[in-house]
Image (spheres, grey):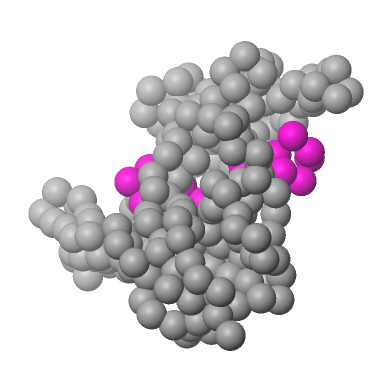
Amino acid sequence: MTGTELHRRLSEPFAAADVEWRVTKLRSQNSEGLVVPFIDSRAIQNRLDDVVGPFFWRTRFIPWHQYVPKPGRYEDPNEAQKAPVSSQLCGLSIYDAERKEWVEKVDGAENTDIEAIKGGISDSFKRAAVLWGVGRYLYEIPAKWVSLDKYKQIARPAELTAYYTEQLSKRGLCAAQNPNTGSAPSGVYAVRGLQPAPVQGYPAAAWVDLVTPAGRALRVFSLGTKPGLAGGVRIQDAKLVQRSGAGGTYYELQDYQPAA
């Protein structure tokens, strides 16, 4: 696997079911919250297992520094000094078979308020994964105000699922169409290019970059290309089927006909 292909696969968007939302700010008597998307450590572990294999990535954690929190705005500065907060670095390494060596990227985080050590280790791991491209696109999705219930939990999660899908589509990171299991909308698709992605048993498999009838970018996966499928041609009667895997949600191009 080339470095470009590795980065592409690690950077692929996650399925909406893998994305969680954190409330960062409250307003309107705590009935609304500003939320941002994130993924947990298990989703990252699954992505690494799927892309490079469970025996070809590893982590190590290194003590970093300690700091003493300053008194808050409404706290008495003469009170006893607060306990130091520890932090750690996480080195996330992936084995490069061509170079026959481990490549490591490092980032860190402080311990958290809840389950301090476990939370700090998890946060530093997630930050290191971002350096490899895992979930980095989530930083591009704007925070959103949503309704909260009486427990300050998100009241309508389905709205965030739709918002997430919309934001991915705007960035060309997922199919512009709504999820379906049948044929794509009728019309002519332009093929912008193909990127070979051979898998076991399917040496001709490839990612195909299309332009939809509505003029939107759409990347789909094809297990086997028909003769004549290449950049610059047009196809019609495309059958696109949504798939879900460890790497997230994607569309498979199962059939099509050449267009005039």
Q: Nearer the viewer, residue 13 or 192?
A: 192
> Which range of residues does the magenta coloring cover?
1-20
Q: Quadrant of the C terminus?
A: bottom right
Query: On the image, which quarter does residue 108 sit in?
Result: top right
- Give the vertical position of 72 relative to 182 (above or below): above
Q: Position of residue 218 (x, y in %)?
A: 53, 68
Residue ID at (63%, 27%): 52
Q: Quadrant of the N terminus?
A: top right
Query: On the image, which quarter does residue 53 sit in?
Result: top right
- Give the vertical position of 247 relative to 232 (above or below): above
Q: How many marks?
A: 0
Residue ID at (85%, 25%): 98
| Residue 87 in view here | no
Q: Position of residue 96 (x, y in %)?
A: 79, 25
- Give the vertical position of 214 relative to 100 (above or below): below
Residue ID at (57%, 18%): 54
Image position of 233 (left or right of 29) = right
- Give the vertical position of 33 relative to 5 (above or below): below
Image position of 1 (left or right of 157) = right
Q: Position of residue 226 (x, y in %)?
A: 60, 58
Q: Outermost residue, right direction?
A: 99
Image position of 204 (left or right of 239) = right
| Residue 4 in view here | yes
Residue ID at (44%, 69%): 238
Q: Main secondary structure of the magenta part?
A: helix
Q: Outermost residue, left direction?
A: 150
Q: Nearer the viewer, residue 12 or 250?
A: 250
Q: Nearer the viewer, residue 126 or 171?
A: 171
Q: Position of residue 20 (x, y in %)?
A: 36, 46
Q: Nearer the viewer, residue 41 or 228?
A: 228
State yes or no: residue 203 in magenta: no
